[in-house]
Amino acid sequence: MAAQDFKDYYAILGVDKAVDQDAIKKAYRKLARQYHPDLNPNDKKAEERFKEINEAYEVLSNEENRKKYDQYGQYWKYAQEGMPPPGTGATQYEDTDFGQYGDFNDFINQLLNRYGQGDRQGRRAYRYYTSDGYPEETDEFDPGYRSPYHSYAPQPDVEAAIVLTMAEAFQGVVKQLQLEGEPSFKVRVPPGAKPGSRIRIKGKGRMNPFTKEHGDLYVTIDLAPHPFFKLDDQTNITCEINLAPDEAVLGTDLQVPTPDGLVTMKIPPGVKSGQVLRLRGKGWKLLKGERTDQLVKLMIVAPKENELSEIERTSYETIRAHRMFNPHANLENITL
């Protein structure tokens, strides 16, 4: 196996080797959105970059696999000679014939336990959505587990990712998917899909050459940025609204965009810039038909000098001359 075949997955994701799992996930999502084929049509370089990003994340997102990669990857040239890494003594790789690997991908396939399923040890339960949009419990092999009865058949399950607009994810959508060398098919994404949601599509993975049966396809959902709406960690929809100074002082009724259209929000007198008001039940869709909230952040914006009419300027000067409120009063007694 050629030493130059080694891939630095940390460099591919643009992170330091010491970062935690959250940083790896954040870097992956940012790059996946940037290079996703849906957002870069007919761009072969972006497509190849996207594949590299997914391959790197598949290894580094699993703590056990990442530990193996960290221990072994930096000594890739020794694997070419069939020797264990220097200075490690008797390691888990000591009895391994590294000459069996044709290239780096073969090593990663075994590292991720992509070959075969062996016995039924090492399984654990996961919750997915079926292609019909319904939740389903399934058991899947722990990627870090390696059976002593391991057989070398290609793992038929396949991972893929799609990027949806916020409207598609909120309302639900039917997407046409196609894996390389396979006929296209449709998959229904249920309303309220969140970034990181996974959809399980039975029988759309690779074919196992021994059983002649197809594995499953697991599709991870990500969302393209929206110019106004965002999602927070609790899946509330967030947005920012600008207020004029007089609206902040006197209060007003404001027409605010929501996923359902414009609604009237009552702005109370005396709000502060940065204050957040809540529109209950106007947020993201949940599985049981419920809704989260929409959080509206108010930002007070002063007009520029050339945007004032003569009447406005005179009114502001009158207010300044007669203003009782002193926002700077707290500064008078501040000392070191």
Image: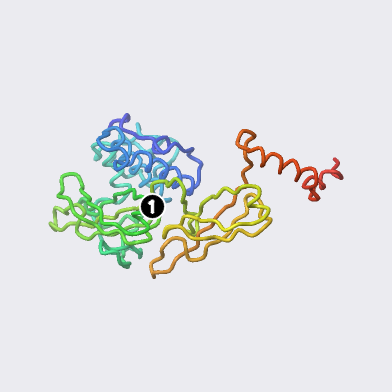
Residue 299 shown left or right of residue 42 in the figure = right
Residue 169 picture location, percent across and down? 36, 56
Q: Residues within 10 Å of mark 1 (few under 14, many from 20)?
A: many
Residue hosting label 1: 166
The foreground one among 200 and 206 is 200
The foreground one among 140 and 261 is 261
- Name the image quarter holding the N terminus: top left
User: Residue 149 is drawn in which quadrant?
Assistant: bottom left
Residue at screen point 35% across, 64% down: 127
Outermost residue toward the top in this view: 4
Residue 279 picture location, percent across and down? 52, 62
Residue at screen point 60% across, 58% down: 267
The foreground one among 92 and 279 is 279
Residue at disc 1, secondary structure? helix
271, above or below 137, in the image:
above
Residue at screen point 28% across, 46% down: 109
Outermost residue toward the front in this view: 311
Residue 64 picture location, percent across and down? 41, 51
User: Residue 305 is drawn in which quadrant?
Assistant: top right
Total marks shown come to 1
Q: Amino acid at mark 1?
A: Met
